[in-house]
Amino acid sequence: MGNDFKPYVPEVAPYRDITFKAVFIGAVFGVIFGSANAYLGLRVGLTISTAIPLAVIAVAVFRLLTPLLGQSSILDCNIAQTTGSASSSLASGIIFTIPALFLWGFNPTIWKIGALAMCGGVLGVLFMIPLRRFLIVREHATLPYPEGTAAAQVLIAADEGGAKAKNVFLGLGIGAVYKSLIGFFHLWPEKIFLKVPVLKKAVLGMEPTPALLGVGFILGPRIAGIMVAGGMLSWLGIIPLIAYFGEHLPQPLFPEQLLPIAQMSADQIWNRYIRYIGAGAVAVGGLITVAKSLPTMIQSLRIGIKELNLKRQGLQAEKKRTERDLPITVLFTGIILVVTILVLLPQLLGVHTSFIMRLIASLCIIIFAFCFVTVSSRIVGMVGVSSNPTSGMTIVTLLGTSIIFALLGWTDILGHATALTVGTVVCVGASIAGDISQDLKAGYIIGATPARQQTSELIGVITSAFFIAAAVWLLGKSFTFGSEALPAPQAVLMKTVIEGVLGGDLPWGLVLIGGAFAVVAELLRVPSLPFAVGIYLPLSTMTPIFVGGWIRNLVEKMSAQAGTPPRQKTEKGVLLSSGFIAGEGIAGVLIALYAFIVGAKPRGLGLHWPGNVGDLMALAIFLLLGYYLFRKTRA
């Protein structure tokens, strides 16, 4: 479906796709934003995509430095944001796993942390080489990649100006102001909740933010509806069931060890029970996705090998610039190099590990990274990088690796640490794959050369890995992982999973229940992966996405009734939504930078609204924002 698409920059355009200035500026800002993202993730357990803020900053910097650096093209800006955005994904992979090593009493060096991150990042980029034709080109019309689309629209709007620029930058301003008011000044709650009567501990939640509203509009009603259905199953179905049947239990119900269910809140039930169910659903949904994609991946590899043979024989026709990927030999060479490094350098997977343990751990890394690069790339095509359930994929990796280690008798603390390092490399690889998918989507829309983007992403991984590792190490030494100042919630969860499997007390029943939900979804011909993501992520994340998708559906129906092509109307909404995502992303990075410098989250103005006034205010402003998006799109 992507074959008829015409990029913004024609393939015959006389632009250089990759320049030193673009790579250098991208790498510098990538390190800055990646460090801030690392702190944010260690504080609250999530990171944000920096692709869009980096795109905006690249435009501004290149224009400011035009007298010094000369004229810069849209492709320069694209390469800068591609290089820099790698750092955010590196930060996600490191902070979700490495702190657990410190909690076990190990003291990994900056060199070890950086090397593990670099290996994972390289695998994530390389495994995406054969997938690009399928996920980015063939499914261009079905996988919107919201942040990639938004980054492309920002760059195009800045390049050509006019009405497009107005819509994008109008949304950017609204998104930035909105995020600042709730994230910095705390004028109203960032999340609102409504208790549902009759159903025990059932809660409807919402994060009334412009970015999630924009993501929903770009996704459309179908995927948004499937995702919110998964969330409603968790929060209006499973949580009330657990609360109902567990309210008279005097003792805690495994895996919870402290509180009886009657004393637990809906959030605590979700954290201690639903997350395991969601992880199982994501795991099975991911495996189904890999199985469905396997023929395409094999076909892509065959095409790459065939092209290599034709090239050796001098029979290959010259490809268009916009169709050139890095050669398939780079993929195989990179895999062999990474495995060699992991096996021959015991310092990475554990100084006292045997050769066999390192070899099996390396094979686990390759297999799981291959699977979850595919899963991650498809998920971010639907929900974006910021909502990518990388932690769920890491949990599955840790489950699989820990089971293998348990069967082989490697259940001591060294086995714990080695399993975690496997999870680190895979987590970074899955994160990077999601990031480069967004970058490749932006490049496809703009008209960049894929091989140049893949090269710049590799450069970004290699240049920023040790800087981000140093930032994480320094934060741990300064604030202590697991403390109130730096709770590292995701890493604590990974630690619990490994100890549960190798200690024999993981709640397998909950994991398999989640897997059954994914299978049922497939039997009903509902895409299991977005449904599983809905189960795993909080419902408060899904509801604003659903509102955005519903607004788009309403616009399309009204346009069709009026005889206007729906795409002509929705294009305005996509531009405005892209601005919402970009603005909130920039404000989020600035807030994270503030928190990193000050050492604490912004305290706001100290306002305390009585009763539910704050929640009602947040809901009213969000509904006004939705109405504004609708009217602006319909105009």
Image (cartoon, grey):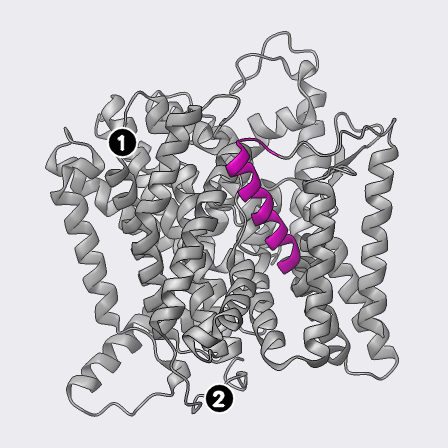
Q: Residue at x 18, y 91 (%)?
A: 314
User: Toward which corner of the image does residue 262 lie, by quadrant?
Assistant: top right
Q: Position of residue 156 (x, y in %)?
A: 59, 76
Q: Residue at x 79, y 29 (%)?
A: 199
633 inside magenta stretch: no
Amino acid type, callout 1: Pro
Is the residue 156 above or below the residue 25 in the image? below
**Quarter in which the C terminus is drawn:** bottom right
Circle 1 — which element? loop
Q: Any mark on residue 269, and which?
A: none
Q: Residue at x 80, y 71 (%)?
A: 633
Tally of numbered tags: 2
Asked whether residue 129 appears in the rendered view, the answer is no
Q: Position of residue 510 (x, y in %)?
A: 52, 31
Label 2 environment density (alpha carbons within 10 Å; few <14, some 14–19, many ≥20): some
Asked whether, in this view, residue 411 is left or right of residue 540, the answer is: left
Q: Which residue is mark 1?
A: 108
Decide whether the magenta segment is chiefly helix, strand or loop: helix
CA distance separating discs 1 and 2 = 48 Å
Is the residue 391 above or below the residue 411 in the image? below
Q: Nearer the viewer, residue 209 or 558?
A: 209
The residue range painted magenta reads: 582-601
